[in-house]
Amino acid sequence: MLDFIAANIAPIMFGALIIMLLIGYPVAFALAATGLGFGLVGMELGLIQTTFFQALPERIFDTMRNETLLAIPFFTFMGLILERSGMAEDLLETVGQLFGPIRGGLAYAVVFVGALLAATTGVVAASVIAMGLISLPIMLRYGYDRRLAAGVIAASGTLAQIIPPSLVLIIMADQLGRSVGDMYAGALVPGLLLAVFYAGYIFLVTRLSAKAAPGLPPEAQTLREKPADTDRKFYWPLALALALLTTFAMVRLWGAPGLTASLLPEAINAAAWSVGGVIILTAFFRGMVRVLTASLVILIAIVAVLSIFFDHWLVGRVQTGSEMIVAASAAFVVAYVVALANKMLGVHFLSRLAQEVILVLMPPLALIFLVLGTIFIGLATPTEGGAMGAVGALVLAAAKRRLSFESVKHALDSTTKLSAFVLFILIGSRTFTLTFFGVNGHKWVEHLLVSLPGGELGFLVVVNLLVFFLAFFLDYFELAFIIVPLLAPVADKLGIDLIWFGVLLAINMQTSFMHPPFGFSLFYLRSVAAKVPYLDRITGRSIAPVTTGQIYAGAIPFVLIQIIMVVITIAFPGIVTHYKTEYVAPALDQNAPPPGLDLPGAAGAPGLDLPSPGGAPGLDLPAPGGAPGLDQSPPAAPGFDAAPPSLDGPAAPAAPTTAPTPPAADPLGPPPALP
């Protein structure tokens, strides 16, 4: 019996952990108890030494000294302050009015606001509860299908787990030993694609059944001016301003098609292209103008042209790579100033809807640029970006006059609880993995997964199926702290990019919020959805409640969309690996010593004087990339004293004391061939 336990202690240990989690024992203590308990068993069986746990305090202190994890309380605090500031309510009301007239407009608004809240708050519970309280009653009032309404709200809230600044991505980067900034950059495109797929599903449903998601009736469109005088009065002045601005930008930056030596023909040519562009724009966006109002469409076009102009103008004036972000920020500031002047001066340059959309959308977009923009261009670390986001959230709440001592106290209290929760789980995870690796559990996992048929693809299929089914019972924190540390070494050995692997797992783990019957997003929605019939305060009609079965049924199509996104990420890894910068090979110095000989010694000098275990002068140290021929020093030619190797190049031959003879052989051997 003892021999059986000793031979299979790793799978027994993993199974014991799963059983403790399933019976409801707290995750942090289940991890720590399993690690300590099986560590003692391993000592008794002679599998690990009695001094094994002396490494545990250092591991715990390494976790506490990890500055990257500071981003978790910063981003959590930012999200809670923004939740208390009423930003979600303002966004849902305004964007709902923007898309309301079209079929599925409220559902599109929920997806758009869900993505925007994900990029600012990063808190699933806050997003789902806010959208459930505000949007769900309106959807039910105007006859939306209950399954579609519940599913789109629950799914849009989970976007906070994949769109930066997600807490899951921070933990994933820490567990994989990779940069949080790279993880954010890799996850951005898949997160936005997922939101687009949600919108595509809504479009498909509304095309198949118009009654599933009808548009808002005219009496519900409170921000739209019925005569649309503003749009009729200012559409052509705005179009002319766009044409002139485009003309200036084209002449200033690129000239125009068919460039001539004279500036006048160039300007005329550019003006013709600009006016033609406005006509095409008007024809192309005919339907959009009807939905968004003409003044908003033209203002968006002006912002786009300004962004392009500033992008080219800033080349060489700001940090390389940051031009587009700075240009877009400047263009957004211009749009915000125009909308603010329109409201304060009462000039009616913009329609009321366009004005409210700009004033409501610009502050969260500015916060996104402040946080993610500085991280992506390398101006700030994720921890510093989180700190700036927390300060920015306080400023936005104060500007809306919704910052109070009680809201700050509540945000600090919740942030402290979540941070302590994550830290305790991380300490328990460190304890578990220490013992698991000590009993060679990592070799068991590696042998189990590497021997799968299909190689890398087989490994990815099995791992994603495992994570998908474990997500029925474990949440994303538990999956990140338990499963990822076991899978990462195997993925690395198979040559899989760990950033891509982490984003792939994050997309898969997102389903843990949507899985019936244990998805937390479904529970959040169930807590705010009507459980009994009620009278609508606007129409006075009796509204039937939303059943738990309808919430579960509505979640299933979005779980399938998430699975499709996993398949797309495997099939097209470039949507994640675009984060990699192009590698520029350094210039090779012909006089430089061969690779592997410049390892620093104890005193800081190159490590040629470090004695090797066998007594040779330090030349058996492995070179990076496995440079050939450097692991042994060939003997000097007979009759000659080999000179010590030079730091500037190959050793010079010893000076002959008698008649000239051929030079001594280089004691380091021939340098490796240049690639």
Image (cartoon, grey):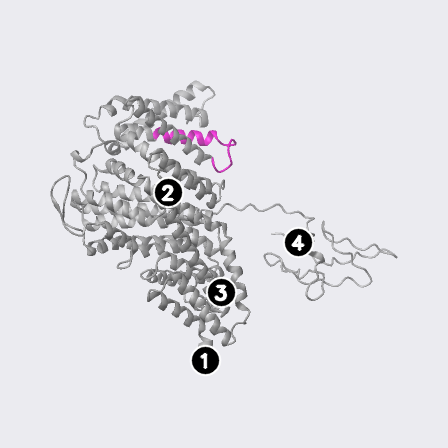
Residue that carries the numbered disc 3 in the rendered image: 434
Amino acid identity at mark 4:
Pro
N-term mark: 1 or 3 = 1
In this figure, which residue is indicated by the disc labeled 1?
A: 2
Which disc number belongs to residue 106? none
Q: Residue at x 44, y 40 (%)?
A: 388
Dot placed on the residue nearer the N-terminal end, 2 or 4: 2
Residue 175, horizontal then vertical, whole percent = 46, 56
User: Residue 302: within the magenta?
Assistant: yes
Crowd band around label 3 with a 10 angstrom C-alpha radius: few (<14), some (14–19), many (20+): many
Q: CA distance from mark 1 to mark 3?
A: 22 Å
Amino acid, disc 3 = Leu
Q: Please give the range of residues in magenta.
A: 301-322
Residue designated by label 2: 408
Left or right: where 117 falls relative to 495: left
Point out residue 635 in the picture as x, y percentages from the top left corner: 75, 63
Location of residue 254 by image quarter: top left
Locate residue 516: give its quadrant: bottom left
Q: Where does the image place residue 425, in percent across and percent down from the top left?
A: 42, 59
* Residue 601 lies within the magenta run: no
Q: CA distance from mark 1 to mark 2?
A: 56 Å
- Determine contact: label 3, label 4, CB under 8 Å: no
Q: Which residue is mark 4?
A: 600
C-alpha distance separating marks 3 and 4: 30 Å
Quick one: which residue is furthest to the left in this view?
A: 541
Callout 3 touching callout 2 (CB < 8 Å): no
Q: Secondary structure at mark 2?
A: helix
Query: Taking 487 as reference, is 117 left or right?
Result: left
Q: Secondary structure at mark 4?
A: loop
What's the residue at 22%, 55% (across, down)?
553
Identify the secondary structure beneath mark 3: helix
> Vertical placement of 9 versus 554: above or below?
below
